[in-house]
Image (cartoon, rainbow, N blue to C red):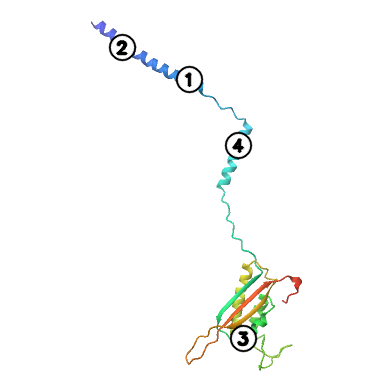
């Protein structure tokens, strides 16, 4: 009886092994079929492969590089303006200073007004005013407070000239006008002096022979 049981066990083990082997064979056959259907890609020559690698590297470098932001281009202008609204100065003084700085360069006008503040240069006036020393000088005064206001305006005008892209050496004060502003009332119904001033500068060619 024992011999029969041993033989039956052996037969069962062999049957299991055969099943496992058949499964392995089926898998191998499927893999072979897949390999038969697979078509290998044609080999790329080395030179072309190197070229493709270089192109890819250049594209990566360009993508990494940050493009510099372009600064906004300011259109060039031939004229610059400075406005002083409701200045605490006499209209008469502003009017004579305007004619004094007209057709001058901005730097020379500033230097002349600085001399006026130091009482070294006179602004020509009209009317019954004492005569002053100097060639061609009939009468004049030293409008110190108004000159200080004009200097601050001329410095602002100089900045506007540079911002507009104008040549500072070729620019001249083309016009300077003064007009009455609204006058505030004070105690005792005395009105304070207020003046509006507009100074314009333009760029001229040297050939035109503009005054310095």
Q: Which of 111 and 212 is in front in this view?
A: 212
Q: Which quadrant does the C terminus fall into?
A: bottom right
Q: Is residue 3 left or right of residue 187?
A: left
What label sits on residue 33 in the rendered view? 1
Which dot, 2 or 1, sits closer to the camera?
Answer: 1
Which dot, 3 or 4, sits closer to the camera?
Answer: 3
Which dot, 2 or 3, sits closer to the camera?
Answer: 3
Q: Nearer the viewer, residue 183 or 139?
A: 183
Q: How far apart are marks 1 and 4 (CA)?
A: 34 Å
User: Helix or strand or loop: what does disc 1 sit on?
Assistant: helix
Q: From the top left corner, tell me how far across and down residue 169 is, in percent.
A: 69, 71
Classify mark 2: residues with Cα within 10 Å, few (<14), some (14-19) or many (20+).
few
| Residue linked to disc 4 | 52
Which residue is drawn at the image coordinates 60% and 40% (left, top)?
Answer: 55
Sequence order check, earlier mark of 2 and 1: 2
Q: Distance between the residues labelled 4 and 2?
A: 62 Å
| Residue linked to disc 2 | 12
Which dot, 1 or 4, sits closer to the camera?
Answer: 1
Sequence order check, earlier mark of 3 and 4: 4
Q: Is residue 204 left or right of residue 28?
A: right
Q: From the top left corner, tell me how far across and down residue 46 is, in percent.
A: 62, 31
User: Helix or strand or loop: what does disc 4 sit on?
Assistant: helix
Which residue is drawn at the image coordinates 37% and 16% (left, top)?
Answer: 20
Is there a contact, CB below 8 Å, between mark 3 and mark 1?
no
Q: From the top left corner, tell me how far across and down residue 94 is, in percent.
A: 61, 84
Q: From the top left corner, tell me how far across and down residue 70 is, in percent.
A: 59, 57
């Amino acid at each position: 009886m024992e011999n029969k049981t041993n033989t039956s066990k052996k037969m069962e083990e062999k049957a299991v092994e055969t099943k496992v082997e058949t499964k392995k064979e089926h898998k191998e056959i499927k893999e072979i079929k897949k390999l038969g259907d697979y078509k290998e890609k044609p080999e790329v020559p080395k030179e072309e492969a190197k070229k493709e690698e270089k192109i890819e590297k250049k594209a990566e470098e360009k993508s990494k590089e940050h493009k510099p932001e372009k600064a906004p281009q300011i259109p060039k202008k031939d004229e610059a303006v400075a406005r002083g609204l409701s200045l605490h100065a006499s209209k008469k003084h502003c009017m004579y200073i305007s004619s004094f700085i007209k057709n001058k360069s901005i730097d020379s006008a500033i230097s002349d007004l600085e001399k006026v503040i130091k009482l070294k240069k006179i602004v020509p006036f009209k009317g019954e005013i004492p005569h002053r020393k100097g060639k061609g000088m009939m009468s004049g005064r030293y409008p110190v407070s108004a000159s200080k206001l004009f200097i601050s305006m001329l410095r602002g005008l100089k900045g506007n000239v540079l911002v507009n892209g104008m040549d500072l050496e070729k620019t001249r004060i083309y016009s300077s006008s003064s007009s009455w502003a609204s006058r505030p009332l004070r105690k005792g119904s005395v009105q304070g002096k207020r003046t509006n001033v507009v100074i314009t500068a333009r760029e001229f060619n040297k050939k035109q022979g503009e005054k310095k």
